[in-house]
Image (cartoon, rainbow, N blue to C red):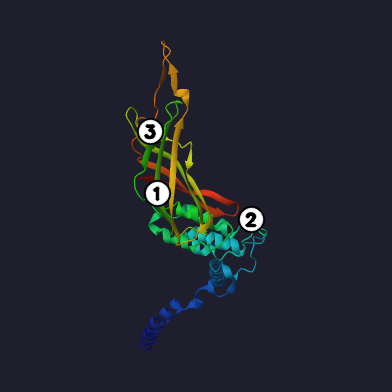
Amino acid sequence: MKKTNNLFFLIILISFVLPSIALASWWNPFSWFSFFRNETVSIRSERVLENKEDCSKISTVLDTEKGEGKDSCYFRQARDKNDLSICNKVETTDGKLSMKTRDDCYSLVIPTISTIQGVSVCDNIIGESRKTEILGQCYARFPDYKPYELISNGAPVIKDTSDLERGDYRRQFSFSVKLKNIQVLPFITGVKVGACRGPNATSGIREYYSWGGKISKTYNKALLPGEGDTIDFTYSLETSGSVCSYNSGGTRICEDPYKDVVKVISCDFTVAVDTESGGIEKFKQTLVF
């Protein structure tokens, strides 16, 4: 009987102690030594990622053989996040210390800009030596946006100024446009008329190019943002006696090559802006009358 009681007591004791042993952390032999643990490795990895994201904590501005420079870090972030504003943190701006400048960062991000973002993303571009060119690249991502306004004051007026005795046929048409600088930086330096078009009896639409007249204007005082101007243009078409010939009876016959020029329906314009190398053709627009 005594042996039976001892055996029963031993079974109860084991049933209480065994779960505690099974759940005890020290029961796992692999946890007895610190070199089997990976806590330090994971913490170090998190710190590396944190420093990578915070580019300002990188002490070296330019690229080095040892790792990523601060500017390169900003380049990567701006590209990955498609964010022009991050480029403004790039410290190298003159290109003397590095091949990668702030403008290069803009140029890297601009091709990835979506029209869904809206043209206001271009406002993140700040002043640089190539700012006008960079802004032009940014605005080009939004075909329907123009940082200026060019509108017609009315349909061109056509005049026949031919000299029939000399066999010179001419047409001259004049028109007026309004130009306003909305957001062209630093300013607009001029505007020029290119090809114009009108209906033709045989070919449908005919394209014309001026041989003279007033087809461009260069400003002595450039148009700053918010400023505007009204410009009068004179577009001249002319030819010489080469359109005349003699028939078999010796009679001189001339044919007017501009007899179909009765209406002008559109003209191409180029708005010039100022850059580091001087005024260049930048924005192009077709104005329909």
SS for callout 3: strand
Is 177 rendered above or below residue 54? above
The location of residue 198, given as percent across then percent down, is 36, 36
- Residue 241's tag is none
SS for callout 2: loop
Query: In this orientation, which residue lies closer to the viewer: 16 or 64?
Result: 64
Q: The N terminus is located in which quarter?
A: bottom left
Circle 2 residue: 99
| Residue at x 44% of width, y 77% of height | 23
Task: Bin the neighbour count of mark 1 within 10 Å (Cα to Cα): few under 14, some 14-19, many 20 and up.
Answer: some
Farthest residue, direction bottom = 2
Q: Amino acid at mark 2?
A: Met
Q: Amino acid at mark 3?
A: Arg
In the shown orientation, is residue 10 left or right of residue 188?
left
Circle 1 residue: 176
The location of residue 178, given as percent across then percent down, is 40, 53
Circle 3 residue: 206
Query: In this orientation, which residue lies closer to the viewer: 231 or 268?
Result: 231
In the shown orientation, is residue 151 left or right of residue 109?
left
